[in-house]
Amino acid sequence: MPPWLLKLARFWIHKVNPRIASLIATIGTVGLFVCLLILYVLAQMSEEVLEQEAFSFDHAILLWIHQFANPGLDAVMLNITRLGNPPIVVFIGAIILAVLWGRRNYQEAKIFLLNGLGGTILSYGLKLVFSKPRPQLWNSPISETSYSYPSGHALGAIVLYGFLGYLLATTYPKYARVFYGIATILIVFIGLSRLYLGVHWPTDIIAGYGVGFLWTNVCITLLKLQKHG
């Protein structure tokens, strides 16, 4: 075996392979497969968005949802969507960060901050990259001026409420299903509210969920590696 190849093999065995094994053990085989699948779907969908291809189901789903619109439901959806508005998200995030730091959960606090800052950068950065216009199928009760893809509300909902659900579930494992259930309901309904209000296409919501899920899992994995590494 050539010396350079022997060095490469040793580097893989002693440096790379243990890190990959640790990563797979932390995420789990199923979790790794899910992340790769989401990454593939996002890549395919984002390629179409960059090429300015239209998704026929985007219009169909929005128009189907709009047929259920009424003043009472408008008020409900407006209140739900506020839970994903940047001022509310920042306010809730600041409280969580203060609680974590006050309880000396420094690792959790640092990763929580990283999760939030990274999610914000991804949201605004990807919107600028794709520059996809928002839907204009009817007069929405709210006005949005930023680009559409991916949905910042969907992404932010997973980053904030998904990560918070994980922290609470690991702190109080007896009630893990309750915390994950509440987080899932919040995330789903925030995304649904954006569709109901007509300010996002379904593909925007799917992309926001996908990016938010991947980034949040990266942060959770970093936290696990720090705590158990």
Image (cartoon, helix red, strand yellow):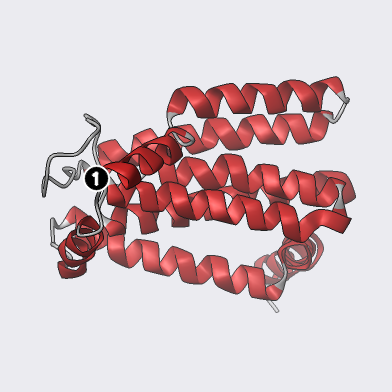
Residues 172 and 35: in front is 172
Q: Position of residue 72 (x, y in %)?
A: 33, 43
Residues 169 and 23: in front is 169
| Residue position marked by numbered label 1 in the rendering | 130
Picture quadrant where residue 97 is located: top right
Furthest residue toward front: 72
Q: Position of residue 59 (x, y in %)?
A: 16, 62
Q: Which residue is painted at 86% across and 49% down in the image?
A: 172
Asked whether, in this view, residue 75 is left or right of residue 64, the answer is right
Residue type at mark 1: give it.
Answer: Phe
Asked whether, in this view, residue 60 is left or right of residue 148, the answer is left
Q: Position of residue 76 (x, y in %)?
A: 40, 42
Element carrying mark 1: helix
Asked whether, in this view, residue 108 is left or right of residue 121, the answer is right
- Asked if residue 220 shows in the view, the reply is yes
Q: Quadrant of the N terminus?
A: bottom right
Q: Position of residue 100 (x, y in %)?
A: 79, 28
Residues 75 and 60: in front is 75
Picture quadrant where residue 147 is located: top left
Q: Which residue is painted at 13% across and 56% down in the image?
A: 52
Q: Residues within 10 Å of mark 1 (few under 14, many from 20)?
A: some
As drawn, 129 above or below 174? above
- Asked if residue 150 shows in the view, the reply is no
As drawn, 68 above or below 123? below
Q: Which residue is painted at 60% across and 37% down in the image?
A: 115
Q: Which residue is painted at 75% across and 30% down in the image?
A: 109
Total labels drawn: 1
